[in-house]
Amino acid sequence: MFKKSTLLVSFVLLCFQLCLAQNDVKNNPPKPMREFRAAWIATVANINWPSKPGLSTAEQQQEAIALLDLLKKLNFNAAILQIRPQADALYKSDLEPWSYFLTGEQGKAPEPYYDPLQFWVEAAHDRGLELHVWLNPYRAHHTSGGEESATSIVKSRPELVVKLKDGQYWMDPSKKEVQDHSAAVVRDIVKRYDIDGVHFDDYFYPYDSYNGGADFPDDQSWTAYQQGGGKLSRGDWRRESVNTFIERIYKEIKAEKKYVKFGISPFGIWRPGYPESIEGYDQYDKLYADAKLWLNKGWIDYFSPQLYWKVNDIPHSLPVLLGWWQSENTKGRHLWPGMNVGLGGDDKNVDEVINQIMITRGMLPNSKGALHWSIAGLVKHEKLRQGLVDGPYKKEAIVPASEWLDKKAPDMPIVTVAPKDSLWQIKWNHPEKSDVFRWIVYYKYGDKWNYRIMNRNDSSLDVLVAISKSANIKDKLLLTAFGVTAVDRTGNESEFHEYLIGQGN
């Protein structure tokens, strides 16, 4: 003899089979939050990953998965992984040697062999995270980078590098051969790996402190420029070299894969006095980085000035600087500031991070987002993690669309649904599945909509049918409607269609 609750569920399922219908009238379910949420993962000096050189393949992979799982748990949607810290490679490259920070010996591959970047890309995408590769375009050797191998650019192309007083080697940005080499590295990565972005940080010409306060040692290049009839000042000549390279990288990335975003995270202050209350380091005059120009010209898809200062730090205030950078965002690119989550894990600093996120949302409502330096702060501070998931990152978010790259939305998924025990199992597919990066499943309990963001390999979601103690049939089925949309690599979402479920009354 069947139990009464079983009969009720069977009756509801029968009603569903008879009453399911596509509703052509949009009911406007709430759209998912659109916000870029990323963390930097540094490999130079083994800051974040791997924890030390020479770990086994299994240990490296376990550490990588732990970091990606953490980001997933905190409802982040992107990771910025450093893969070229010193003209080397944390991936298989025919252009540069394997990184010392990976294996403890420059030029030595992991044992047993695997391709770390391929591993990171697949693991990130399986968790619904974008994977952006972070490259240092000019640094040739870091003081923590071990002994240079014969294939290091320091030894194989010594005419392209100079030695700084702190022991680092730096490529000369003015040399065409340097620009050609670094551009070839970027093209190779974009062509061979299924990445979502290419990222540069604030290292262009090096900080003068790296050379004991002395000027960058490029006398040979400068003399050759002058003898060739060059008329620019030395500072303008250096800035022009970097500007030419930045514009070239943007165009070459788009020629290979248009959807791969190019992002730069420059020093947070362009020049002291911009705006009036701002004091501090002059990247225009010291790093020869005219970051304002790159933003003005739209040579980037997202711009992440390193605003590592607190809100009430008057000479370097985060909202004051962010407002100025936004006034220079004449092409309407993504402006996702870099924020410091390494301030500490006490209540005061957690409040500071959350307040910065909320201020950014209010100032940049059309394309919200932030990059957090670095993932170490998230790993270390439990109060910070809890504050994020209880607060601004409580709900999952989709990366904002980059409409200047592509405005065409993907086709609607093919959706089916079937009873499964006391659940509905919603299934979906797509004729061009390779175009889809995420799925959004909308579902309605009674008159309240909610959503789940699903990963690229997901194809179904089991939705609960709630049985109450009441004998009233119409109270048994809480799920009243649902829909599924597809989101492509540039953030475009397919059209939403609502499917109704009959209530049996």
Image (cartoon, rainbow, N blue to C red):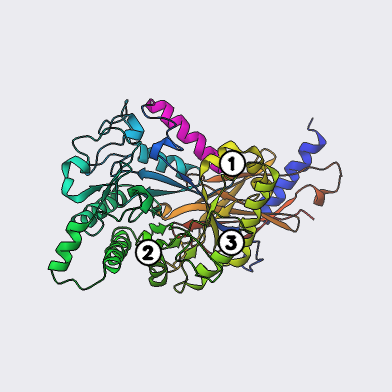
Callout 2: helix, strand or loop? helix
Which numbered marker is on residue 73? 1
Tell me how far mark 3 sits from mark 1, CA to CA.
30 Å
Left or right: 31, with 83 as reference point: right
- The residue at the point 54 percent across, 71 percent down is 276
Mark 1, Cα crowd under 10 Å, few <14 / some 14-19 / many 20+, is few
Please give the residue where the numbered disc 2 appears in the rendered image: 285
Which of the marked residues, 3 or 1, is nearer the chain's N terminus?
1
Q: Is 370 above or below relative to 86?
A: below
Q: Is residue 436 left or right of residue 25?
A: left
Nearer to the camera, 397 or 161: 161
In this picture, is 235 found above or below 205? below
Q: Is residue 194 visible?
A: no
In the image, the segment drawn in magenta is 55-72
What residue is at 52 percent from the left and 58 percent from the top? 337
Q: Nearer the viewer, mark 2 or mark 1?
A: 2
Residue 317 numbered tag: 3
Relative vertical location of residue 367 with respect to residue 464 in this rendering, above or below: below
Please provide percent x and percent y for residue 27. 67, 66
Residue at mark 2 to residue at mark 3: CA–CA distance: 21 Å
Q: What residue type is labelled 3?
A: Ser
**Which amino acid type is shown beneath numbered disc 2?**
Asp
Q: Is residue 64 magenta?
A: yes
User: Quadrant location of residue 1?
Assistant: top right
Q: What element carries label 3?
A: loop
Foreground pick, 229 / 400? 229
Q: Where is residue 442 in the image (x, y as percent from the top left)?
A: 62, 55
- Residue at x 70%, y 47% (from the top left corner): 14
Query: How far apart in space, not on screen, are marks 2 and 1 (Cα)?
Result: 42 Å
Question: Is 445 placed above or below 144 here?
Answer: below
